[in-house]
């Protein structure tokens, strides 16, 4: 948003005309964001999604009618379908749409970074069997896309399981905390994008856990990926888009991984696409994955 002072208006005075703050192009693009969000809300009934979730919704809208404007006056030159390249400016227009009140502040979750966690009040339940203390096996979900955490916390809270999130790879502190609370058999279910940097998250995490295990810590910790994996892309009709390529070694590993499914190694698949291509979105995806896991199907 352009500050009022930059337009010659005192910051202490009220702004009678929002044209001092927003251009006509800002208004046009921001209203388009609001229309896409309202279409998402109408079709899904879900009041919140991520910025990338909204991006995928716009991509598949038959009447997205993305406005191409001319100059400061915001004159609409053409209306066309939304393109993948348009996603580069979606954050800009979404923020302006929020600032102008076209979309509520909570409706579109922006990309975030850093680590966080949701831990149930009771991480383990003990009962007495033959005079001995026995710990109940635990389940955790590890997510390397922080923006999705607020959509998944209610599911984890309901099922009494931990949710750990971070941007990229887990830190030494996250793994140390895992060992501190894993007093019984623990299964970690991972959620990550299908990309050169993230496709092998589950295996890399398992290797990190094995290599960091403290002396005397004997609790079994198993890591299983619940998505995204190559087989799911065609099954769920998730679109592949251009993304970060990663280091050369990562790219070569990724290319070998995708070869069996004939997927383009120059592209990636994102968890956020589940918001559009999985009934009920990413939260429902986790619910169904937990159900399959509890029934022994994962």
Image (spheres, rainbow, N blue to C red):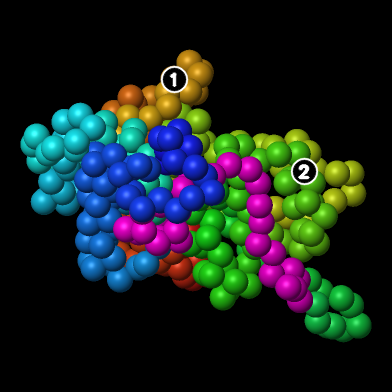
Asked whether the beta carbons under mark 2 and mark 1 sit within 8 Å of each other, the answer is no
**Left-right relation of 249 to 48:** right
Residue 262 visible in the picture: no
Task: Reply yes or no: does residue 101 show up in magenta.
Answer: yes
Label 1: which secondary element = helix
Q: Which residue is mark 1?
A: 252
Q: Position of residue 292 (x, y in %)?
A: 45, 66
Query: Magenta-highlighted stretch: main secondary structure?
Result: loop
Relative to residue 25, is residue 242 depicted above or below?
above
Residue at image point 29% right, 39% down: 23
Residue at image point 19% right, 38% down: 74
Residue 8: name its quadrant.
top left
Q: Position of residue 69 (x, y in %)?
A: 17, 35
Residue at image point 40% right, 51% down: 15
Mark 2 to mark 1: distance in Å? 30 Å
Label 2: which secondary element = helix
Magenta part of the chain: 99-125
Q: Residue furthest top?
A: 248
Task: Reply yes or no: does residue 217 show up in magenta.
Answer: no
Report the quarter where the N terminus lies: top left
Which of the numbered marks, if any, corresponds to residue 173?
A: 2
């Amino acid at each position: 948003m352009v500050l009022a002072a930059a337009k010659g208006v005192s910051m202490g005075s009220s702004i009678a005309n929002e044209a001092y703050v927003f251009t006509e192009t800002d208004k046009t693009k921001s209203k388009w964001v609001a229309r896409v969000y309202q279409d998402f809300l109408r079709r899904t009934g879900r009041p919140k999604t991520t910025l990338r979730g909204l991006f995928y919704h716009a991509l598949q809208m038959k009447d997205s009618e993305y406005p191409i404007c001319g100059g400061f006056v915001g004159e609409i030159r053409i209306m066309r379908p939304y393109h993948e390249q348009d996603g580069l400016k979606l954050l800009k227009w979404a923020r302006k749409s929020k600032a102008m009140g076209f979309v509520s502040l909570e409706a579109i979750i922006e990309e975030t970074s850093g680590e966080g966690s949701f831990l149930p009040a009771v991480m383990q339940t003990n009962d007495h069997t033959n005079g001995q203390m026995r710990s109940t096996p635990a389940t955790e979900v590890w997510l390397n896309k922080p923006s999705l955490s607020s959509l998944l916390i209610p599911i984890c809270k309901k099922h009494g399981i931990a949710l750990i999130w971070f941007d990229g790879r887990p830190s030494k502190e996250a793994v140390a905390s895992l060992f501190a609370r894993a007093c019984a058999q623990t299964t970690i279910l991972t959620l990550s994008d299908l990309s050169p940097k993230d496709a092998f998250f589950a295996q890399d995490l398992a290797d990190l856990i094995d290599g960091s295990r403290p002396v005397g810590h004997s609790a079994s910790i198993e890591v299983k990926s619940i998505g995204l994996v190559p087989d799911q892309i065609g099954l769920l009709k998730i679109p592949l888009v251009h993304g970060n390529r990663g280091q050369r070694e990562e790219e070569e590993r990724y290319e070998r991984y995708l070869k069996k499914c004939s997927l383009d190694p120059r592209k990636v698949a994102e968890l956020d696409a589940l918001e559009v291509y999985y009934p009920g979105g990413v939260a429902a995806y986790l619910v169904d994955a937990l159900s399959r896991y509890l029934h022994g199907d994962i």
